[in-house]
Amino acid sequence: MIVVTGATGNIGRPLTQAVAEAGHQVTAVSRHSTTVPNGVRHVTADLARPASLKPALAGAKALFLLLSGDLHATGAHPADLIGEAAASGVRRIVLLSTLGVATRPYGPTRIAMRELEDILRESGLEWAILRPGGFASNALWWAESVRTRQVVAAPFGDVGVPVIDPADIAAVAAACLLDDRHTGGVYELTGPEVITPRRQTEAIAAALGSPVRFHELTRDEAKTAMTQSMPAELADDTLDILGSPNPAELRVSPDVQRVLGRAPLPFTDWAARNVAAFR
């Protein structure tokens, strides 16, 4: 049995599907009831209460651990999830970390995530750590404004990073859960090229076949919007990267190619697959 947390999200959903299609039993975990692929077991749990994960972990051999936003906040104890997994007999954990652990190690959320990585390394379990950069799916923040006003509103319009398609993160996670060769691996995951919000807007417009205007937000305006769905510290860390990426954050990593044997998917592919969200 393999347990996938965050199973309703942009990574968890394709990961659940991929592991199930590979012939493994899967338990999909989310905070709320949801539909899952045929043959997949669903368990409702709140990772902020680690004990609530216990029913999902019964009989599991591997766990994909994706932390919800509140588990990045000050005072959270995500390490308890690793302890709960170990106590339940889980042998392997694949942790979704962040590239910022390596590129900006002194931010508050990065320090906390580095500590969690270290706890996992020292847990006695098999492990792999995924460190993605910016997600292509963050463009879904723009979906409503594109649908209603044909506009993308974002900060730092001409500053880019190599955003990664969540489908590639899911594919790498599946490989790490299922293949012993990836035990002890730390993988930095990026897309194939640096792309700016303005160019992302052009890709969405091309997928739609209709014009979309780009409107540049100030940093303060962007933070106000972001803190509706994440802690302020995490919003500030994210905006620091988006506004002034350092050379390590601009680097295109070879790790997707190394694990999957193919290049990472470009943003244009993500936009074409998700165009319905913007109509």
Image (cartoon, grey):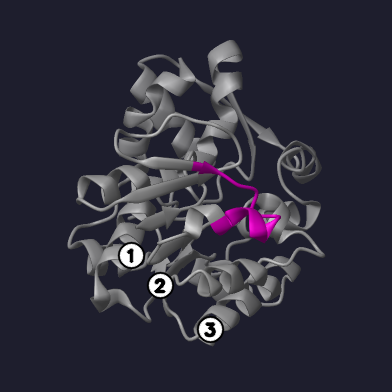
Compared with residue 54, is residue 15 higher up or lower down, i.e. above or below? above
Q: If the image is split into quadrants, where does the N terminus sit?
A: bottom left
Specify the amino acid type for callout 3. Ser
Depth order, front residue of 69/228 = 69
- At a point 32% along the width and 60% down the height, the residue shown is 172
Residue corresponding to mark 1: 177
N-term-proximal mark, 2 vs 1? 2
Magenta stretch holds residue 46: yes
Residue corresponding to mark 3: 123
Compared with residue 5, is residue 103 higher up or lower down, i.e. above or below? below
SS of the residue under disc 1: helix
Specify the amino acid type for callout 1. Leu
Depth order, front residue of 11/193 = 11
Measured as percent of width and height from the top left, residue 144 is found at 59, 20
Distance Cα–Cα, label 2 vs label 3: 10 Å
Side of 55 where 52 appears, left or right: right
N-term-proximal mark, 2 vs 3? 2
SS of the residue under disc 2: strand
Q: Which residues are magenta?
A: 43-54
Residue corresponding to mark 2: 92
Distance Cα–Cα, label 3 vs label 1: 17 Å
- At a point 70% along the width and 60% down the height, the residue shown is 72
